[in-house]
Every structure is written in C-alpha cells, then in structure tokens.
Image (tube, rainbow, N blue to C red):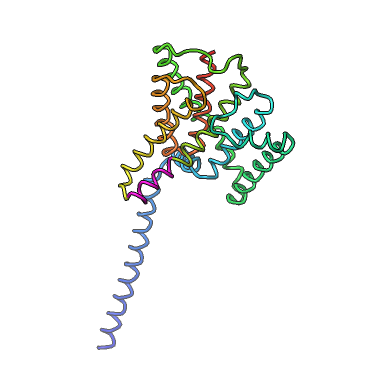
Amino acid sequence: MHAGFLATLGGRADTAAVVARAGHAGGERDATAGRQTRASPPRFQWIRSYLRSSRRPEGAALAALPLLLIYGYGLLIASPAARSGVDGVSSALLGLFGVRVYITVLGALAATMLLAVGLRLRGRLGGHALLAAPMALESTLYGLFLGTVILDVMAWQGLMGPLLVDASFVEHVVMSAGAGLCEETVFRLLLLPGTALLLTRGLAMPRPLAWALAIAATSLAFAGAHHLGGEPWDRFAFIYRALAGVVFAALYLARGFGVAAWTHAVYDLYVLSGQT
C-alpha cells in the first residue's frame, strides 16, 4: 500500500515536472514572440545602426579622410588665402621641408588613418565605408539649411560680398574643406570637451552647466578667430558666426565629428558661392 502510494506520488511529481517544463518552454516562446513583435522593422534597425555607427570614432575618421586629402593637396594649387586660419601645420611643413616632404607626410597620414580604422574594425571596413553616402546626404541637408539662413541674415544686414578676392571655385572648395576639417578639429573635437572637462574636474561644476558654458565659450572663440585672422570686425558677422558655432557644437555632440565637419564644409562652400 505504501509502495503504491509512493508510486502514485512519484507519478504525480513527474507529471507536475513535465507540466512545469512545458509551461516554462511556453513562457519562453511567448517572451521570444513578444520580443520579435516589439522589434522594430528592418528599416528602423538600419537607421539606428547608421546613427550609432556614424558617431563612432571609426566613422568620424573615414569621414574626415576625404576632407584631409581635398584640403591638404588642394593647398598645393590654391592661393595662400585658402589656408585655414587655425592651420599652422601645413604652412610649417611646406616652409621647412618643401612640397615633396609635404606630399609624403600627408599621404602617410592618410594611409595611417585608413590602416588604423581597418585594424580596429577587423574586416568591417567596407560596411563602414558605405556610411559615406548617407553621411554626405545628411551633412549636405544640414549645411544647405544653415547656409540659407546665414545668407538671408547677411543680405538683411547688408553684409554680402566676396570673402576672397578673385577666388576660383577650386579655392572655395579647398577653403571649405579646410574650415570643416581644421576648425571642427580645434574648436569642437579638442576645445569643447577639453573646456567641459576642465570645468567639471577642475572647478567641480555640474556637467550640464559645464557643457553649456563650454559650448558658449568655444563658439565665441570660433567667431573671434575669424577676426583675429585678419577679417575686419563686424558685430553682426561675429554674432552669426557665434550662433553657427553653437549649431556646430550641437551637431558634434548629437551626431559626431564626421557629420559636424562635413556640415561645416558644405555650409562654408554654399555661403562662399552665394557671396560671389
């Protein structure tokens, strides 16, 4: 009797275990189905992947490489006025070592950047290279919109006029590439986070306030640098450049260095072309 009772209990226990496992498996299937149902459509997954990948350092380096080549080699055929005001390296290389060494150093720098990105991505270089087209489109839209606003403001204030006397379109392209690469590197890539770090670490300032002050300070420095480079002082020009600096800083923080640099280049080219 006891044996039969124990067997009955054992059978019930086995049955309960089977039911529990089945319920657990069913719950897992339901959870998986729920996750699949909640998953975004493939096109939204691609957009999220693009937004994430284009902000990574690898995407920024690949985006900066064409600007480096356009500006660096373009200086060899453009007038000295096309050189960026914050670029002291190119003129020093050309002056101290000559054209041949300059070309070699520039090519070695571009090759090193490409090799470093390739090693970091480990076989995914081609996929990241495909980001160039959507990044160019995104930056072009931002640059054209910002340039249109700036040109309207300049026309309203009577500031229209050529920035470079007798400048060709090629010089405009070289100057714009240099502005996007050099100015974004100095003011957004280096000074903006450096200033925010100094305020948070050195002065124990809250992060939101530190970043807000860093954006304001670097945008004012960005606007002032144009006048320190020889452009006559104009209050409205200083103001709209400072506001443009705030926009570029916001783009840098939201979309990364690559989009900010190309937006700046497109914006400059559009404004320069619209002034001539």
Please give the name of the residue rendered at 52% of the width and 20% of the height, measured from the top-left corner: 270
Please give the name of the residue rendered at 46% of the width and 43% of the height, measured from the top-left corner: 52
Stretch of the chain drawn in magenta: 192-203
Dividing the picture into quadrants, the one containing residue 95 is top right
* Residue 195, magenta (yes or no): yes
Q: Position of residue 180 (x, y in %)?
A: 53, 31
Seen in the picture, residue 64 relative to 197 is either above or below; the reply is above
Dividing the picture into quadrants, the one containing residue 23 is bottom left
Q: In this view, which residue lies farthest toward the bottom?
A: 2
Q: Position of residue 185 (x, y in %)?
A: 51, 38
* Residue 264, magenta (yes or no): no
Q: Position of residue 75 (x, y in %)?
A: 65, 28
Seen in the picture, residue 254 relative to 13 is either above or below; the reply is above
Seen in the picture, residue 102 relative to 74 is either above or below; the reply is below
Q: Which of these two is toward me, 94 or 77?
A: 94
Tell me the quarter of the image containing the C terminus.
Answer: top right
Please give the name of the residue rendered at 25% of the width and 88% of the height, measured from the top-left corner: 2
Q: Position of residue 38 (x, y in %)?
A: 37, 45
- Left or right: 132 as drawn, with respect to 153: right
Number of labels in the image equals 0
Secondary structure, magenta segment, majority class: helix
Please give the name of the residue rendered at 39% of the width and 27% of the height, measured from the top-left corner: 243
Q: Which of these two is toward me, 10 or 27?
A: 27
- Left or right: 203 as drawn, with respect to 241: left
Tell me the quarter of the image containing the N terminus.
Answer: bottom left
Q: Which of these two is toward me, 198 or 4?
A: 198
- Left or right: 163 as drawn, with respect to 214: right
